[in-house]
Image: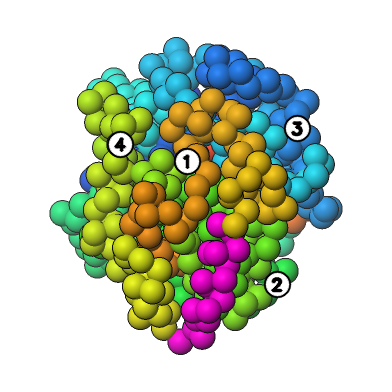
Amino acid sequence: MPHTVTTDVIVVGAGLAGLVATAELVKAGKHVTIVEQEPAASFGGQAWWSFGGLFLIDSPEQRRLGVHDSLELARQDWFGSAGFDRPEDRWPRLWAEAYLQFAAGEKRAWLHEQGVRWFPIVGWAERGGYTALEHGNSVPRFHITWGTGPGVLAPFVARVRQGVRDGLVTILHRHRVDELVTEAAESGAGSGRSAGGSSSAAGGRHGATRVVGVRGVILEPSSSGRGVSSSRESVGEFELRASAVIVTSGGIGGNHDLVRQNWPKRLGEPPASMLSGVPAHVDGRMLGITEAAGARLINSDRMWHYTEGITNFDPVWPQHGIRILPGPSSLWLDATGKRLPVPLFPGFDTLGTLEHILTTGYDHTWFVLTQKIIEKELALSGSEQNPDLTGKNLRLLAKRVGPGAPGPIEAFKDKGVDFVVADDLPTLLAGMQRLSGDAPLDLRQVEKEIRGRDREIGHPFSKDLQITAVRGARTYLGDKLIRVASPHELLDPAAGPLIAVKLHIVTRKTLGGIETDLAGRALGADGEPVEGLYAAGEASGFGGGGMHGYRALEGTFLGGCIFSGRQAGRAVAAAL
């Protein structure tokens, strides 16, 4: 049997939510042990790879750009997008309201105090395109952190590292939790019954037990780099006891079998092929383990996957996909060459687009654009794909407003297997045909769509709502400066060359998860807290078991990890 070690609090997972919770516990003088299955190179989890976007309401950055935002408008957008409609949405609704208050209140000042700064141009993600009460951001709210994902992590990494130096934090890498240890709550002691696997609540009414620790295996040392798959070979066992356990283990995006198992019926059959937007260790196994300890999982069929994925020519993890962050001008065609319907324009409605794509019977789509559009509008998600923002490099950053596309975009255009570049339409169509696979790409339809769209450009009026949307976007200074190209014909030689990009579905976020109250306490099937058990981050659906509902407004995933991690950390500190 492994030697049992006791600490005040165990945090399972060294991602953003876990680090925020730990930082709050350290501030309160508590001893924390972080248990993480991956090597030290992956410290910080998925957040390190992110673009660093944060959802803020009525910020100074918005006001400087003439954006008039308010808590009331943001609430209308959030709840119109979330579409809460289930009895189990009680806590997700409360979390959504609490998060909106945070984003409109102390969020920016609290992060600013810790050294976080933002790029001055606010992005406009998930533009919607429907009515005022439906999905989408009415105004730009996507604040890009100076330093991207690593910049978001930095203050919390620093606080946790200081906790290590002060003797308050122990970080156990290569320790995989296989069980949550429970005992009878009435007696305060018991058999140390373990709850593992993916079965339902452990033994009778969950209130009769409490979570008192974790048990698992020590994995062999690994020199794998950040995000690279690591060995699962066991070299020993461990057991830890604590007054509270906070599960911050992330979602299921790296486990395609689990994604398909939980695939929402409303979206049709799951795709036959997908790329992964997260490392393979984002496998969802702790969700089943936590459920077995008595916690309730809700909204498991709510998830967030992108439709603008491209194959990484230099992959870090298996099936590594990179998401294009598109401006609104590219012509979007399905696998057969037919244009996607209104308002499924680039950057308008992620899940609406996903639902439509799956009705076509194929898993891929196409962007058709020009060099002029790619230079102004296409960006790539991820810290590693934005060296100017991640490295806080002003010289590189200046190139975003100058001629030419950013270096990472040009690299994908040159080396990416999903790109076709041509000086004329026949050559472009031939290249698309080569990449179309089994899909019956109708080249005549593609040409018809391109020429029909171009006829709408040469006059100030148009029945083409995408063109109207592009012109409307350019009334926002941020879009006009660096995000939206001036309208032009795709077949204009001066705007060339022509470019086609084959787009894939790429997995990303789990919107459902462990049901929690506003203190981050995990709830059981009867709605009562499971004693000693808390959850935060993506494992809890970013709060409550799904504070986004069915759809997200973007910039809300990192923020959800921060807010839920802070809530759980402070609640545990107050309870001990």
- In this rendering, is residue 200 above or below 121? below
* Amino acid type, residue under disc 2 in the picture: Lys
Rendering coords of residue 44 (x, y %): 35, 40
Residue 367: mark in rendering: none
Magenta stretch: helix, strand or loop mostly:
helix
The residue that mark 1 highlights is: 485
* Amino acid type, residue under disc 4 in the picture: Pro
Q: Is residue 71 left or right of residue 552?
A: right
Q: Earlier in the sequence, mark 4 or mark 3?
A: 3
The residue that mark 2 highlights is: 265
Q: Secondary structure at mark 1?
A: loop
Residue 75: mark in rendering: 3
Q: Secondary structure at mark 2?
A: helix
The colouring scheme, among rainbow, by chain, secondary structure or one colour, is rainbow
Q: Earlier in the sequence, mark 2 or mark 3?
A: 3
**Circle nearer the viewer, 4 or 2:** 4
Residue 366 seen: yes
The residue that mark 4 highlights is: 403
Q: Earlier in the sequence, mark 1 or mark 2?
A: 2
